[in-house]
């Protein structure tokens, strides 16, 4: 048999130990589904409120959030220009010059740039229009002037006409007719709205560009040259139109850039071809003149000397021209923009060879025009900063033109160097040949070789020139539209129905979690584990008292019978059963249990004495319809005899002693010799003595009454008794010579795990004839929850 703890407290016991007994393993059982449901029922208001709030929030979000549609166009990075123009475009373009850069990712970044978004906004002015009071899709043929930034147009919808107002300007037109107002033009092609008024907002260009860039999703497909272009908008038609427009604008811009690059290359080859043709004509003319003259050896030597002199003069001219182009190249690389412009102007104006080059002259004129435009944008009243889109665009054009001019000059320098090398080679061959052959033969061979070299170069340049013309005529770039965006059928997200279901599920989870959190933070005794932790015997379970009818008080009567039976077995000693009924705190139902338990003992034939030991706030006399004094304090003061203080009640053989006159020395009276004499006297005349004491937290009264009676019956009210207070008071009782019989669980709800241990089953209450109803005080003092 397990060793008894002080005051008969034991390790945690199972709830079915209503008559005592410890658990077999000493470990707390795992929570069951019934325990979880009990937690939810204890906090049903909190859980239901949280679930309702979460569901309402989800419903509000689903109702107020506008649907969003996403359309997707698919483009592919190909090079149809290379396929048509052969190897002409090999090595061309910034991607080739950048080295190992991924061309697909480069195009993706271009698509994501503000330049692309700005081109789309300029191509679709309706992207700068917001509407209130009517559907934006009702507007057609929208166009905005360049100086329009942010304006508000008020619309008034009449029966047959539409009146628009912008500031002081008003315009009235029929539905379907074009309207132009302050640089804003549109046509209202939809039906007349139900509202009488509407508002049309024009947002700034930068704001529209930001909106397009934020809603544009560009994603390359892995290990392919395919790019997905997606756009999200509140209207399906808007999403489809913008996605397709982005693809077409990007394709057109890419094709235009490729054509410009091919045009510059064609102009450069054309210049080189004209120069080579002049060299070929000179070489043929010199050969023909030599053959006509058929000079003598002496003449041959003179002609050879003249040819060498001509080659030397030609080489000096080419070398001078190369130095001039090299000087031009150095000026282009000068970091001082003003000094560079002046030097370029003087150099081009003073050099006939440079000024006669069409490609160089055209690029220089273009560079001057761009720099002049940038100066105009960054000066005057319309001052622009470096962050201005127009200034940045012009700066980019200047940089690209300078790069093209540098490339052309580098090509010319390289060509001149090659021609000088050819002349040097011809001169060296002429000298070598002159040593072996006669002067006439050497000269003729040199002239013939010169003609042949010039002819071969001319043939190659003509082939490249034809390819350049084909590449310039090609109307496509590197972008091919694979799939145009289709009209989205369903909006993004889960939809309002699924959103509502998700909100309900989330609300249930949050509600359950809040219930378990509240249950975990609750410090009251409300779970089976809390009672087990206190280590008390459960001598009875008293359900919640809802009223005074026989049907509603039957569970109380059966519960008191069970408590009576278990108390007698727990008391287990000879002589009268004498104990005090107390609780750790106030409003836990100790008086309710004491009075009804006294009636239960009286019903069993025990001569029972109920003493109201709460000398501070005793009120049992009201429940029993008796008097408060003379009572216990009067007996202890010696102002009356015990016989005068003991009163008969309406529930014989139940007798009652009131608390008596209120005095400030009540705690001292309970520990006095008079109290011991009074207890000894009543023990001889009654078989059951029940003392209703104050709560343990009210002072020493309950401890004094426990010491006087020798036993205490503890009342715990589920959901009200503080667990920490109960543990502290029980620890104090362990130090006193008081026997703790056990505990009575009061106000146990129907969903509690202890409800199954009650002694009442629905339908098995005793049927009483009229006038023979059972006696109970439950209806007189219902236990408030």
Image (spheres, rainbow, N blue to C red):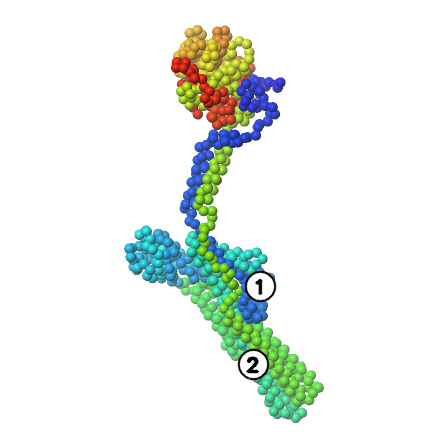
Q: In the picture, which quadrant includes the C terminus?
A: top left
Q: Quadrant of the N terminus?
A: top right
Viewer-closest of 673 and 7:
7
* Residue plotted at (45% across, 21% down): 763
Nearer to us in this view, 249 or 491: 491
Q: Which mark is residue 98?
A: 1
Q: Residue furthest left?
A: 159
Say which label, 1 or 2, has the lower sequence index. 1
Q: CA–CA distance between discs 1 and 2? A: 35 Å
SS state under label 1: loop
Residue nearer the viewer, 781 or 147: 781
Q: Is residue 549 left or right of residue 257?
A: left
Image spot of residue 414 (x, y percent): 59, 74
Asked if residue 663 shows in the view, the reply is: no
Q: Residue at x 51, y 10 (%)?
A: 576
- Residue 481 shown left or right of residue 128 in the figure: right
Which disc number belongs to residue 277? Answer: 2
Q: Judge by depth and name the residue closer to the eye, 170 or 66.
A: 66
Helix, strand or loop at label 2? It is: helix
Q: Position of residue 268 (x, y in %)?
A: 54, 74
């Amino acid at each position: 048999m397990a060793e008894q703890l002080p005051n008969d407290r034991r390790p945690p016991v199972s709830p079915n130990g209503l008559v005592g007994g410890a658990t077999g393993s000493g470990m707390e059982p795992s929570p069951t589904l019934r325990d979880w449901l009990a937690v939810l029922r204890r906090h049903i208001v909190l859980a239901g409120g949280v679930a309702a709030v979460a569901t309402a929030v989800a419903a509000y979000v689903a109702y107020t959030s506008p649907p969003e549609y996403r359309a997707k166009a698919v483009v592919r990075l190909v090079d149809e220009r290379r396929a048509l123009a052969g190897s002409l475009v090999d090595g061309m373009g910034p991607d080739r010059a950048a080295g190992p850069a991924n061309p697909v990712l480069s195009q993706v970044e271009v698509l994501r740039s503000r330049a692309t978004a700005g081109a789309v906004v300029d191509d679709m002015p309706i992207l700068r229009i917001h509407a209130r009071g009517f559907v934006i899709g009702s507007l057609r043929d929208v166009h905005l002037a360049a100086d329009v930034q942010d304006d508000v147009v008020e619309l008034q919808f009449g029966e047959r006409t539409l009146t628009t107002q912008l500031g002081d300007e008003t315009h009235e037109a029929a539905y379907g007719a074009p309207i132009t107002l302050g640089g804003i033009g549109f046509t209202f092609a939809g039906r007349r709205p139900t509202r009488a008024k509407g508002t049309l907002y024009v947002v700034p260009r930068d704001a529209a560009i930001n909106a397009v860039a934020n809603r544009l999703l560009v994603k390359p497909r892995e290990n392919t040259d395919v790019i997905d272009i997606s756009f999200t908008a509140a209207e399906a038609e808007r999403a489809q139109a913008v996605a397709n427009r982005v693809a077409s604008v990007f394709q057109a811009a890419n094709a235009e850039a490729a054509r410009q690059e091919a045009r510059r290359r064609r102009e450069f080859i054309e210049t080189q071809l004209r120069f080579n043709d002049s060299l070929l004509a000179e070489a043929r003319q010199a050969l023909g003149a030599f053959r006509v003259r058929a000079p003598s050896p002496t003449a041959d030597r003179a002609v050879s000397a003249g040819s060498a002199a001509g080659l030397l003069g030609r080489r000096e001219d080419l070398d001078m021209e190369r130095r001039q182009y090299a000087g031009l190249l150095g000026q282009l690389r000068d970091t001082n923009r003003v000094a560079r412009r002046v030097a370029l102007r003087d150099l081009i104006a003073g050099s006939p060879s440079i000024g006669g080059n069409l490609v160089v002259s055209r690029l220089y004129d273009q560079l001057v025009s761009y720099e002049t435009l940038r100066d105009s944008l960054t000066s005057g009243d319309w001052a622009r900063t470096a962050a201005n889109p127009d200034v940045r665009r012009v700066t980019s054009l200047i940089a690209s033109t300078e790069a093209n001019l540098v490339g052309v000059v580098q090509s010319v320098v390289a060509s001149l160097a090659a021609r000088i090398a050819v002349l040097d080679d011809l001169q060296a061959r002429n000298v070598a040949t002159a040593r072996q052959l006669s002067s006439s033969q050497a000269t003729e061979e040199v002239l013939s070789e010169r003609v042949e070299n010039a002819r071969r170069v001319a043939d190659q340049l003509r082939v490249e020139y034809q390819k350049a013309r084909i590449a310039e005529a090609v109307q496509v770039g590197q972008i091919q539209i694979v799939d145009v965006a289709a009209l989205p059928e369903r909006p993004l997200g889960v939809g309002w129905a699924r959103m509502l279901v998700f909100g309900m599920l989330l609300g249930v989870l949050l509600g359950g979690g809040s219930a378990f959190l509240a249950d975990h933070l609750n410090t009251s005794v409300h779970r089976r584990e809390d009672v087990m932790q206190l280590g008390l015997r459960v001598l009875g379970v008293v359900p919640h008292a809802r009223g005074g009818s026989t049907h509603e008080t039957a569970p109380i009567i059966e519960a008191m019978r069970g408590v009576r039976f278990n108390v007698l077995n727990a008391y287990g000693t000879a002589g009268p059963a004498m104990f005090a009924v107390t609780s750790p705190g106030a409003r836990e139902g100790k008086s309710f249990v004491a009075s009804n338990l006294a009636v239960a003992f009286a019903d069993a034939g025990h001569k029972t004495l109920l003493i109201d030991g709460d000398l501070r706030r005793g009120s049992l006399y009201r429940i029993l319809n008796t008097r408060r004094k003379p009572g216990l304090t009067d007996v202890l003061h010696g102002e009356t005899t015990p016989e005068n203080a003991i009163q008969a009640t309406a529930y014989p053989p139940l007798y009652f002693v009131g608390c008596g006159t209120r005095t400030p020395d009540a705690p001292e009276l309970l520990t006095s010799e008079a109290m011991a004499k009074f207890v000894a006297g009543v023990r001889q005349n009654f078989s059951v003595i029940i003392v209703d004491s104050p709560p343990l937290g009210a002072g020493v009264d309950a401890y004094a009454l426990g010491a006087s009676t020798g036993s205490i019956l503890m009342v715990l009210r589920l959901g009200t008794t503080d667990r920490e207070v109960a543990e502290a008071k029980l620890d104090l009782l362990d130090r006193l010579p008081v026997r703790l019989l056990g505990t009575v669980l009061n106000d146990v709800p129907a969903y509690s795990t202890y409800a199954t241990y009650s002694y009442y089953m629905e339908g098995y209450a005793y049927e009483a004839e009229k006038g023979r109803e059972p006696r109970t005080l439950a209806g007189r003092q219902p236990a408030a929850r």
